[in-house]
Image (tube, helix red, strand yellow):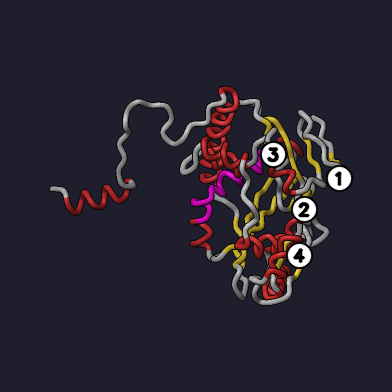
Amino acid sequence: MTTTVQVGAVQAPAAGPEMRGGIPAEVYHADRSSISSSGLRALLDPGCPAQFEYDRGHPSAPKKTFDVGHAAHNLVLGEGPDLVVVEGARWDTNVAKAEVRAIRAAGGIPLKQAEMDQVEAMAAALRQHPLAGPLLAPGTGLAEQSLYWTDLATGVRCRVRPDWLRQLPGLTLCVDYKSCADASPVAVSRAIRDHGYHQQDAFYIDGIQAVLAPEQVRFVFVFQSKTAPYLITVRELHQQDRDIGRARNERALRVYAECERTGYWPDWTGPTTDIPQIGMPTWDTIRQAEEYLP
């Protein structure tokens, strides 16, 4: 296996496994020659192939609600678009709107001064954390590298973009940083379920193994609250959940390969002349049946 590392120039991914830096995030996410972890997750319930295919052809515009999270990500990793403060607590004037549009058009992230203070405080809190600080210490790893490989079972070209890679003797650490409204372990557990982060964990581990072939890979989540005092939860996934995530990825890869082969991207129901039945979630059916049915 040959692994190449190129920095700067943006080129189409080669057929073999490779890791490359210098690919802008918008170029990485717009790539239709390979599929990412978020793409695989979108193919399965509660998503479906039809919605995935539409969304990748109609990318959404940047949303203000994501700016603080993206900005914190940039400060923590030391990589990403420029953060630009727009004066004023309100941006509903024509002058402010024009400035915000110009910043976004140039690839930057517009922030209010209070938001800049917030993300700087988040980064400072992370640096002081006994687990997250050393894991993401500047100069100890590589940020935003893009890894490409081909899934042997389906022939599908795959890609991942680890937030932070630390290559140690016999071990590669992949650290994934997520800002969120609630970083408590209970909320983190729900987020893993709701957002399919167990699929992300397994896919990133598999991608790193395919491209870098380390002796061992560990994937570590770092969740940070976006409200003071910006508390942090650092966790590794249970192996059983990782196995479930890997199985979901394998199914999604088969679905994607079939859709690409046929050009048919079904919705939740697929081709049928019958009207399927539906009911309440299983747990609610059991609970209400016990309470109300004789």
Dot 4 falls on a residue whose secondary structure is strand
Mark 4 or 1: in front is: 4
Of the image marks 3 and 1, the number of the one nearer the N terminus: 1
Q: Amino acid at mark 4?
A: Leu
Please give the residue where the numbered disc 1 appears in the rendered image.
7
Mark 2 nearby-residue class (10 Å; few <14, some 14–19, many ≥20):
many
User: Quadrant of residue 257 in the image?
Assistant: top right
Please give the residue where the numbered disc 3 appears in the rendered image.
159
Camera-nearest residue between 236 and 192: 192
Tell whether 121 sits left or right of 195. right
Residue at position x 56%, y 49% from top? 197
Q: Pointers 4 and 1 in contact (CB under 8 A)?
A: no
Please give the residue where the numbered disc 2 appears in the rendered image.
143
Measured as percent of width and height from the top left, residue 280 is found at 31, 47
Structural distance between the alpha carbons of marks 3 and 1: 17 Å
Please give the residue where the numbered disc 4 appears in the rendered image.
83
Mark 4 nearby-residue class (10 Å; few <14, some 14–19, many ≥20):
many
Q: Amino acid at mark 2?
A: Ala
Give the label on residue 146, or none: none
